[in-house]
Amino acid sequence: MNVILMGPPGAGKGTQAEIIKVAFPIPHISTGDMFREAVQNQTPLGKEAKKYMDEGKLVPDEVTIGIVEERLAQADCDQGFLLDGFPRTTIQAEALDKVLERLHKKIDTAINITVPTELLVRRVVGRISCKECKAIYNLEFNPPSQTGVCDICGGSLTQRSDDQEETARKRLEVYSEQTAPLLAYYENKGVLHTLRGDRETREVFADIKNILERL
Ligand code: ADP
Ligand code: ADP
Ligand code: ZN
């Protein structure tokens, strides 16, 4: 199954992806995670991406499309994939279609998670994650049992440098301007499912599971 997770920053895409990949063993492809890894490793890609990420802007399409194209061609994507945070512009969506056509694949479903804007800001500014296993927590909504320590692996928890209120608001603006128009693109293909993300994580997942089991 070839799935896209859509929704603004803070909607819960990464959180749901963590659960989805346990129930449905398909690779989780997060362009945000790929860029953060490149930044951490100080690769040329990381140096380029960082300039945009720090300002809450999108990394240029040609750079982003290139890394996704390479990733989708890898063998572990043969049984399906879960795209998280890509595509984010119409150009990326059209490029994705071309790549998939070459690979004789198509998108089966695009799941769009909606959350009211002010709650998104609270979620983003409270987000922390494990340096080791990447588990996602929230200082307000889902705190770890011990401050600064991952419940799962004992690793230390850290906050993303772009999860400050000002950058979060900028990213939400960029989402409305550049990414929200894509919902119509997938609606027109008849693959869009929209669900409310301002519920318990397990309730949101139950809906996603239903959609994926019917594919
Ligand atoms: P969030 O989960 O909060 O939406 P991401 O981890 O998906 O954030 O993305 C973090 C940053 O990485 C974005 O603000 C942007 O700079 C960059 N990025 C991630 N995915 C894309 C993409 N598909 N196109 C352009 N930039 C991207
Ligand atoms: P995205 O990948 O869409 O940017 P995340 O999955 O990283 O979003 O979630 C953003 C923040 O909101 C995280 O701190 C996460 O713990 C929290 N969060 C995610 N889902 C929920 C939920 N259903 N209820 C409360 N908080 C949530
Ligand atoms: Zn951990």
Image (tube, rainbow, N blue to C red):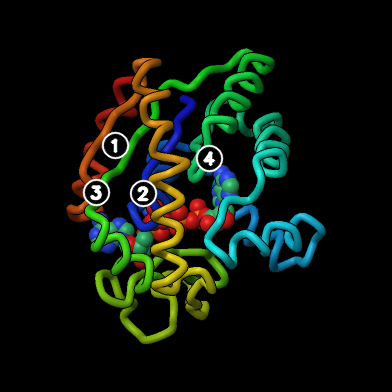
Q: In the rendered structure, which disc, 4 or 2, sits on the residue that comes first in sequence?
A: 2
Q: Is mark 2 within 8 Å of ligand 2?
A: yes
Percent x, y for residue 115?
25, 51
Placement of the C terminus among the 4 image quadrants? top left
Residue placed under numbered mark 1 in the picture: 208
Question: Is the C-beta separation of discs 4 and 2 under 8 Å?
Answer: no
Q: CA distance from mark 3 to mark 2?
A: 10 Å
Marks 1 & 4, CB-CB < 8 Å contact = no
Residue 22 is at least partly visible in this image: yes
Whether disc 1's CB lies below 8 Å from ligand 2 is answered no
Q: Any atom of ligand 1 within 8 Å of the CB at mark 4?
A: yes
Residue 16: numbered disc: 2
Question: Which mark, residue 86?
Answer: 4
Q: Label 3 belongs to which residue? A: 197
| C-beta proximity under 8 Å, tags 4 and 3 | no
Q: CA distance from mark 1 to mark 3?
A: 11 Å
Q: Secondary structure at mark 1?
A: helix
State if disc 1 and disc 2 touch (CB < 8 Å). yes
Nearer the observer, disc 4 or disc 2?
A: 4
Q: CA distance from mark 2 to mark 1?
A: 9 Å
Sequence-first disc among 4 and 3: 4
Residue 113: % across, % down: 30, 43
In terms of sequence position, does the residue under pointer 1 or pointer 3 come before the other?
3
Dot 2 amino acid type: Gln
Q: Residue at x 72, y 37 (%)?
A: 66
Q: Residue 114 location, x and y as percent? A: 27, 45
The answer to whether mark 3 is within 8 Å of ligand 2 is yes
- Tell me, yes or no, whether the two marked residues, 3 and 2, touch with CB atoms within 8 Å: no
Between the residue at mark 1 and the residue at mark 4, the CA separation in whole angstroms equals: 18 Å
Looking at marks 3 and 2 on the same chain, the residue that comes earlier in the sequence is marked by 2
